[in-house]
Amino acid sequence: MTSFRPAPAWLADAVFYQIYPQSFADSDGDGIGDFAGITGRLDHLAWLGVNTVWLNPCFASPFRDAGYDVSDYLTVAPRYGTDDDLARLVDEARRRGIRVLLDLVAGHTSDQHPWFTAAADDPEDHRYIWTDTRTGSGTDASFPAGFVASPGARPGAYLPNFFDSQPALNFGYARSDPAEPWRQAPDAPGPLANRAALREIMDHWLGLGLAGFRVDMAASLVKDDAGNTETRKLWTELRHWLDATHPEAVLLAEWGDPAVSVPAGFHTDFFLQFGGPTEGRPLRSLWNNRQGTDNDGWDPVDCFFDPAGQGSPGTFVDAWREAVSVIGDGGGHVALPTANHDFARLNCGPRTAEQLPAAFAFQLTWPTLPAIYYGDEIGMRFIPGLPDTEGSVLGPRYNRAGSRTPMQWDDGPNAGFSAVSTPDSLYLPLDPSPDRPTVAAQRADEGSLLHLVRRLIALRRGTPRLGAAGSVDVLHSGYPFVYVRGGRYLVVVNPRATPATCTAAAFDTTRADALEVSGVAVDGGMITAQGFAYGVFDLTPEEPAG
């Protein structure tokens, strides 16, 4: 691994909370969430115990892809407020011990970005990938597959990422091809200008008190890059710059392959529903029940957290072990999300609220950095059948809007998310269920999922052996899933509907002290777990004083 400055000490204790800003809290009654709304709800996050917030893109944008089409990296979108509103959010969060990260869309811009509108009229501009090459002749001549005809005076066509409205920034190609003259080297002037722009953008926001960035599609910058060799070089260069100029800042990758991205320079990468040699199989083997957001191209895998009990934690555990063996001690971290803005929530399809406690017991005690998607702490549902909103539909069974509905704060109008007078004006419809969970109701119920998540976070943060650095010994890889953290803390998780048993002969369980338990009994060396049960035990509790 390239020698980097060690990750900031605070990162090892991070409990991430992802906020989709347009759906979290609306302060001005226009139906769309904003910075002031988030600021007004920071006490909820502080009470919950999270200490690091990641905001989805909040830069100026025409919002054809929910803000992932940036038209100005140095200006916030008016729908969210002003620079001063963001500064106040960051300052108020800091006062509560919470760091704030922004989302950096590094690989493309909006077609309304001034860089692109200039490039569309200037054949000498190489910020984006352009070609004049056509195949065929006469009226049948066409641009190469994937390219989109120029919207300006410049002849030719540009290459987009994802939607046509998202022209790909030019970071070069790893391999040249005489038949494709638009391929520039990664060290050509256009790609180098874009690298410099990334530094300028990061420097600007870090200078205003932000704690770092989650980088969108971080693996995709250099094109035709087998093994991501050139893309890894790019991020290594940027990490060295970050270490020298902002040593307390962090970079989180949307890469989905921590064994590659962390050695390349990221402080943390997520296991995701895509990425890596098996295209996201480790995460999908935990959560994906083929409901909600589902890609027809994904290989089928029975998820472990399913009432039928047909899955296995082994796929995830093996991938995690491989990643940490490559990363090594102090090299960085792996993050495990409950969900995200592109992937179905935990409470999705046949998975119901009673199954969620076991999922959180696992996520908050495994040696990864936990990332809680807003609303998952109360068990918000994935809502099917919503309209395509700001580019949310990616396929016939992949509508991301179902994971982006308004936060459910209380039983008041619009679930306390917004004071807008007409529900049709909300960014997305609310969960229509009359028994939808709310923060207020669960705050009032000590037995709720919200209180459990809060207690598990406190247990994790107060018990170093349950954190990212503590060891793990897997005693039983099945139903129930049983492991010991730091040689002392026994964790039992049974996410299926029927009871399960196993032995724990490798550890002395005679003095097991229940710390957080529901439906699990430890009797001698035998562990019995009821359906949807979980338990955290201290195997060596302190002797009472006196």
Image: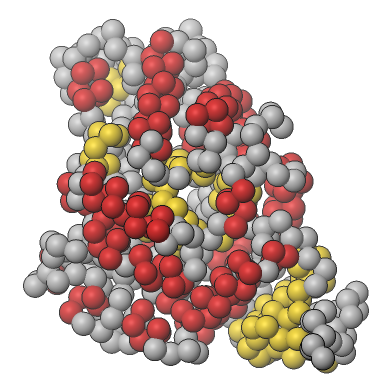
Question: On the picture, is 169 further left or further right than 156?
Answer: right
User: Looking at the picture, how far across and down is residue 149, in whole percent?
Assistant: 24, 23
User: Looking at the picture, how far across and down is residue 56, in whole percent?
Assistant: 36, 50
Residue sitting at the far left: 421
Please, is residue 541 above or below residue 297 in the view? below
Q: Quadrant of the N terminus?
A: top right
- Residue at figure coordinates x 20%, y 75% from the top left: 414
Please, is residue 172 above or below residue 311 in the view? above
Question: On the picture, is 386 further left or further right than 272?
Answer: left
Please, is residue 207 above or below residue 473 in the view? above
User: Looking at the picture, how far across and down is residue 176, in whole percent?
Assistant: 52, 12
In this rendered view, identify the residue nearer to me: 206 or 414: 206
- Residue at figure coordinates x 62%, y 48% from the top left: 9
- Residue at figure coordinates x 48%, y 89% from the top left: 446
Q: Is residue 135 visible?
A: no
In this rendered view, identify the residue nearer to me: 210 or 171: 210
Q: Quadrant of residue 311?
A: bottom right
Question: On the picture, is 517 further left or further right than 254?
Answer: right
- Residue at figure coordinates x 61%, y 62% from the top left: 285
User: Looking at the picture, how far across and down is residue 293, in whole percent?
Assistant: 42, 60
Q: Is residue 521 visible?
A: yes
Please, is residue 365 above or below residue 19 in the view? below
The coloring applied to the image is secondary structure
Q: How many marks?
A: 0
In this rendered view, identify the residue nearer to me: 278 or 502: 502
Q: Quadrant of residue 302?
A: bottom right
Q: Quadrant of the C terminus?
A: bottom right
